[in-house]
């Protein structure tokens, strides 16, 4: 989200905690505040990593339902065979392995807010099943014939463009109209250049506190590199890049060599994005640069834990510390001739 003082993962934030210097983000927040004053369903559009979930939480925390539960789940992750159980719950013995009565998402969200993330990726069967519950607030647990009711305020999100949802039949038209009471568009990070300095400063402060460091800021090259990046992963990518940079920095200023960005997964299509090799701003075939890139990669995999990184690299912790100091003090980066 756009806040200058709220972390990406904070769950108790209200809309009053967020601010922006960018007109697009200001419009998004104004629409969110309007939505918080109503009980209408909300559909949030935005690319992956833009902070749709934390915006949904902030809307809930700023609404009359702030004291109620906030139940969030990714609709695309719903198993086709367990949709009824996951959404509406089940009775003991309803199916093999059902050892006890379990409440579903709708029942858990009673008198509160239900957030359906990536709702357009829900299967057609799943869409038809939730329509009745959304429209009438009624559902039945699997294995029961008792009709139950839940007073639920619905928030939904999708990374798909609004115009494509019904045209390309990603969403049933009747379902689309039921969930689209208020539409909110969260702009991508690349469209918010005025917010980027505050967001970077916020992430540096948070990462420093988490890692027990005192990082004052970025050197000029690092700042230029960060602000020139187009952030395809949005706030999620920004958080990961800054956390890794803080982990790699041994002084008080983040050097450009501590910044690395995910490359395309060209060698292994099945590779998980978090395992992708990350590289410094420029590329080089020099052995020294390859070694440094590998050190950064291993530190990323171990989430900045130098003891684990040293063990995976097969070197002593002191040797790793010495290499990191040498990298930062030299200020070298791929492509340097020194």
Image (tube, rainbow, N blue to C red):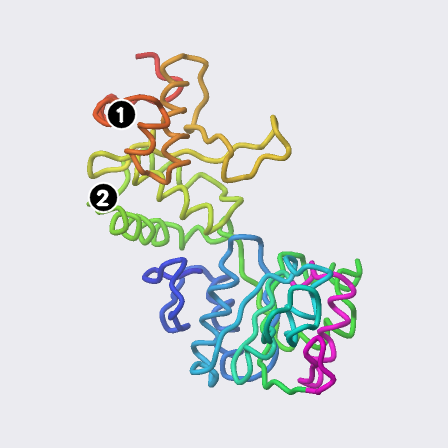
Figure check: 140 above or below 44: below
Q: Mark 2 or mark 1: name the one nearer the start of the chain.
A: 2
User: How many numbered marks have been drawn onto this rendered protein structure?
Assistant: 2
- Check disc 1 and report its element: helix, strand or loop: helix
Q: Is residue 163 visible?
A: no
Quadrant into which the N terminus falls: bottom left
- The part of the chain drawn in magenta is 119-147
Q: Position of residue 35 (x, y in %)?
A: 53, 78
Q: Quadrant of residue 310?
A: top left
Task: Let me know if residue 134 is in the magenta part.
Answer: yes
Q: Residue at x 57, y 80 (%)?
A: 153
Relative depth, front residue between 242 and 77 = 77
Say which of marks 2 and 1 sits in front. 1
Tag of residue 320: 1
- Which residue lies under the disc numbered 2? 215
Q: Is residue 35 visible?
A: yes
Crowd around label 1: few <14 · some 14–19 · many ≥20 (10 Å): some
Figure check: 333 above or below 123: above
């Amino acid at each position: 989200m756009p806040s200058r003082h709220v972390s990406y993962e904070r769950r108790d934030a209200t809309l009053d905690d967020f601010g922006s210097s960018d007109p697009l983000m200001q419009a998004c927040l104004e629409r969110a505040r309007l939505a918080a004053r109503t009980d209408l369903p909300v559909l949030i559009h935005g690319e992956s990593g833009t902070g749709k979930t934390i915006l949904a939480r902030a809307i809930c925390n700023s609404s009359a339902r702030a004291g109620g539960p906030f139940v969030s789940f990714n609709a695309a992750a719903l198993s086709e065979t367990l949709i009824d159980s996951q959404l509406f719950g089940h009775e003991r013995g309803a199916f093999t392995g059902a050892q006890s009565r379990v409440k579903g998402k709708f029942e858990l969200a009673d008198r509160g807010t239900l957030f359906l993330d990536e709702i357009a990726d829900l299967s057609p069967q799943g869409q038809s099943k939730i329509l009745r519950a959304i429209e009438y607030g009624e559902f039945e647990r699997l294995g029961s014939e008792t009709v139950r009711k839940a007073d639920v305020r619905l928030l939904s999100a999708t990374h798909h463009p609004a115009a494509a949802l019904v045209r390309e039949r990603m969403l049933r038209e009747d379902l689309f109209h039921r969930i689209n009471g208020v539409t909110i568009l969260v702009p991508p990070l690349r469209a918010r250049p005025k917010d980027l300095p505050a967001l970077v400063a916020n992430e540096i402060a948070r990462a420093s506190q988490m890692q027990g460091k005192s990082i004052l800021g970025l050197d000029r090259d690092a700042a230029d590199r960060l602000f020139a990046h187009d952030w395809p992963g949005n706030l999620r990518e920004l958080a990961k890049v800054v956390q890794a940079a803080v982990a790699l920095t041994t002084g008080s200023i983040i050097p450009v060599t501590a910044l690395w960005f995910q490359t395309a997964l060209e060698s292994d299509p099945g590779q998980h994005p978090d395992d992708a090799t990350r590289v410094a701003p420029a590329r080089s075939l020099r052995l020294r640069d390859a070694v440094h890139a590998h050190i950064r990669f291993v530190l990323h995999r171990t989430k900045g834990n130098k003891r684990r990184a040293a063990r995976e690299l097969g070197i002593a912790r002191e040797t790793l510390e010495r290499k990191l100091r040498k990298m930062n003090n030299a200020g070298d980066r791929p492509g340097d001739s020194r």
